Amino acid sequence: MSKKYLYSLMAVLVAAATALSACGPAATAAPTAAPAATSAPAATSAPAATAAPAFAVGVVLPTKNEPRWIQDETRFNDAFKAAGYTVQILFSDGDSAKEKANVEALISQGIKVLIICPQDAAAAGAAVDEAHAAGIKVISYDRLIRDTASVDYYVTFDSVSVGKAQAQYLVDHATGTKNPLYLYAGAATDNNAFLFFEGAWDVLQPKIADGTFVIKNSDKAVGLQGSATLTRDQEGTIIGQVTTDWKFDTAKNLAEANLTAAKASDKGNVFILAPNDGTARAIADTFGADKDVKSYVITGQDAEEASIQYIIDGKQSMTVLKDVRTLVKDAIAAAVDYLTGKTPPQTTTYNNGKVDVPASPSPIVSVDKSNVKAAVIDSGYWPAGDFKNLP
Ligand code: GAL
C-alpha cells in the first residue's frame, strides 16, 4: 500500500474522531505516527494523546476456522499498523446472527464504511441493509453479498479465473483418456463457490466431453456433462452433491465416502478438483491413504502455509495465490475513496441477484513446485524460514 493512502486514511480517521477507546490506537502511538503536516495536513488536527479517534471503518470477517481469514486479519492489522493505528476487526464465528450483531455494534460506534466478508451470502443481506439505512457505505470483501441493493462495492479477486486455473492444471497434467476425475466444491452459501465452479467447468467440460476425464463422484455432474455452460441452479445441483462446506471434516468424510463407493478401477491415477487449500489437504490425505490410488493430482487455493509445505513435499499439486495484501490494499483504498467523497475504481460489475455491483477484480497466480519460491517466498508473501526443503 502506498504511504499516501495510509496517511490519507489516517487523516480521515482522525478527522472523524470521537472518543472510542476500545479500538483506538495506543495513546502514545497516534501523535508520533502522524505524518508531517506537508504530506497529510489533516493530521495536524490529531486529537490530544488522551482522546482516541473513532474508527470510520469497521471490518467483519467470517470465521477463524478457515485459515484463509486469519491471513486477512493479519494483513489488515499490518496495513493499519503501518499507519500507527489499530483497526476494529470482528469475526462472525461462522454464524450469521453473530455477524449481524457485529455489524450492529459497528453501526453504533459510528463507522462510515463497512468492509464485510459474509459468512452466508444471502443471510448477510439483512445486516448490510441496516448499515446502509444508517448511511454507511458497504464494501463486500472477497465474497459477494447477494440479493440486496445495499452493497456499494465489491473488492475481490477474479474468482472465475481461480476455477479456470485449477482446472487447467488438471488438464495440463492428464494424458490419454478415461482419467478418473473427482470433483469437490466450496460452501453453497458462498457465492465464490459458484464462481470457482463456473471457471473450472468451463475448462473441464470439453475435456470430459472428449473422454480425457471421467467424473467418478457425482451423478449430477455426469447428468450435466454435455452442457458447456451451466445455469446457477444447475451449478447448485452439482455443488450440493460435492460440497465440502469449506470444512476439513466434511471434505474428509465426503472423500472417504466417495472412495468407499468407488471400485478399484475408478481409482489408479486420479485427478481431483479441490476448491481450496484446507479441503485439499484433507482430501489429499484421504486419497493418499487409499491403497488403490496410485497417484493423484490435486488443486487448491489460498497459498496457505500448510499447503505450501504440502506442495514442497509433493502432497498437494498446486494452489492459487490470491495475494491478500492486494485485497486489503484495495479495500482500504476503496474505504478512503468513500470517506473522501470519491468513487472506487470499476472495471466490471458482478450481479448479486438484485443489482450490478461495481468491482475491479485482482488477478491470481497459479503456483506449483516449479514456481513456489518465486511466487510465494521471493514476493515476500511468506518468509522462507517457515518452510522445510524449499526447492
Ligand atoms: C472463499 C474464499 C477462499 C477460501 C474459502 C474458504 O470465499 O474466496 O479464498 O478461503 O472462502 O474460506
Image (spheres, helix red, strand yellow):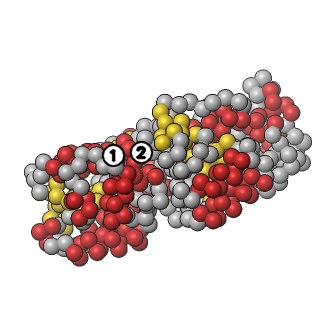
Q: Residue at x 24, y 55 (%)?
A: 224
Task: Please tell me which of labels 2 and 1 falls first in the chain.
Answer: 2
Circle 2 residue: 159
Residue 78 in view: no
Q: Is residue 138 above or below residue 289?
A: above
Estimate how packed mark 1 is, as few (under 14), some (14 to 19) or many (20 or more) residues with alpha carbons within 10 Å: many
The answer to which of 71 and 235 lies nearer the viewer is 235
User: In the rendered view, does 149 fall on the left or right side of 81?
Assistant: left
Q: Residue at x 52, y 50 (%)?
A: 146
* Disc 2 element: helix
Instruction: Tell me which amino acid carries mark 2.
Output: Ser
User: In the rendered view, does 165 fall on the left or right side of 113?
Assistant: left
Circle 1 residue: 199
Residue 30 in view: yes
User: In the rendered view, does 228 fall on the left or right side of 343?
Assistant: left
The answer to which of 237 and 184 lies nearer the viewer is 237
Does the Cβ of the disc 2 residue fall within 8 Å of ligand 1? yes
Residue 40 image position (x, y, % from top left): 76, 28
Residue sitting farthest toward the top: 38
Q: Residue at x 23, y 76 (%)?
A: 260
Would you say the residues marked 2 and 1 are in contact, meaning their CB atoms lie under 8 Å apart?
A: yes
Q: Quadrant of the N terminus?
A: top right
* Disc 1 element: helix
- Give the Cα distance between marks 2 and 1: 8 Å
Does the Cβ of the disc 1 residue fall within 8 Å of ligand 1? no
Residue sitting farthest toward the left: 176
What is the number of the mark on residue 241? none
